Image: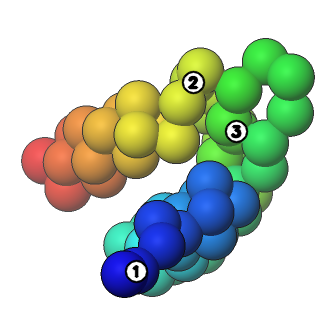
C-alpha cells in the first residue's frame, strides 16, 4: 500500500514547477496568499494556481 504525499511536499513540487515555468520570478507565500515578484512588478493572488494563471496572461500580454 502506498501513502499519499504530504501537503508540504506537493506545494514544494508546485513551487518548483512555477519557478521553472516563469524564470526570473520569485514566489513567496504569506497570510494573504501568494506573491510573484520580478524586478519592480509584484502580483498577488490567493492561490498559487491563480497566480500562475495570471502570470500566463501577463506573459502573453507582454509578447503581443
- Give percent across and percent down for residue 10: 54, 64
Which residue is more in the foreground, 52 or 47?
47
Q: Please indicate whether residue 43 sits to the left or right of residue 55 in the image.
A: right
Q: Please indicate whether residue 22 sits to the left or right of residue 57 in the image.
A: right
Note whether residue 64 is visible.
yes
Q: Residue at x 20, y 56 (%)?
A: 63
Residue carrying label 1: 2
Secondary element under disc 1, as helix, strand or loop, is loop
Q: Going from the N terminus, do you reach mark 3 or mark 2 first?
A: 3
Q: CA distance from mark 3 to mark 1?
A: 34 Å
Label 2 neighbourhood size at 10 Å, few (<14), some (14-19), many (20+)?
Answer: some
**Residue farthest to the front, as pictured:** 1
Q: Going from the N terminus, do you reach mark 3 or mark 1 first?
A: 1
**Residue farthest to the right, as pictured:** 31
- Give percent across and percent down for residue 50: 41, 30
Q: Please indicate whether residue 30 sits to the left or right of residue 6 in the image.
A: right
Which residue is more in the foreground, 46 or 7?
7
Here the colouring is rainbow
Residue carrying label 3: 35
Q: Nearer the viewer, mark 1 or mark 2?
A: 1
Q: Going from the N terminus, do you reach mark 1 or mark 2 first?
A: 1
Q: Residue at x 68, y 36 (%)?
A: 34
Residue 1 position (above or below residue 28): below
The image's mark for residue 45 is 2
Q: Residue at x 37, y 81 (%)?
A: 1
The image's mark for residue 15 is none
Q: Nearer the viewer, mark 3 or mark 1?
A: 1
Residue 62 position (above or below residue 15): above
Amino acid at each position: 500500500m502506498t501513502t499519499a504525499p504530504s501537503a508540504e511536499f506537493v506545494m514544494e513540487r508546485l513551487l518548483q514547477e512555477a519557478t521553472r515555468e516563469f524564470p526570473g520570478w520569485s514566489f513567496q507565500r504569506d497570510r494573504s496568499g501568494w506573491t510573484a515578484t520580478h524586478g519592480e512588478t509584484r502580483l498577488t493572488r490567493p492561490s498559487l494556481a491563480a497566480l500562475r494563471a495570471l502570470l500566463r496572461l501577463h506573459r502573453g500580454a507582454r509578447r503581443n
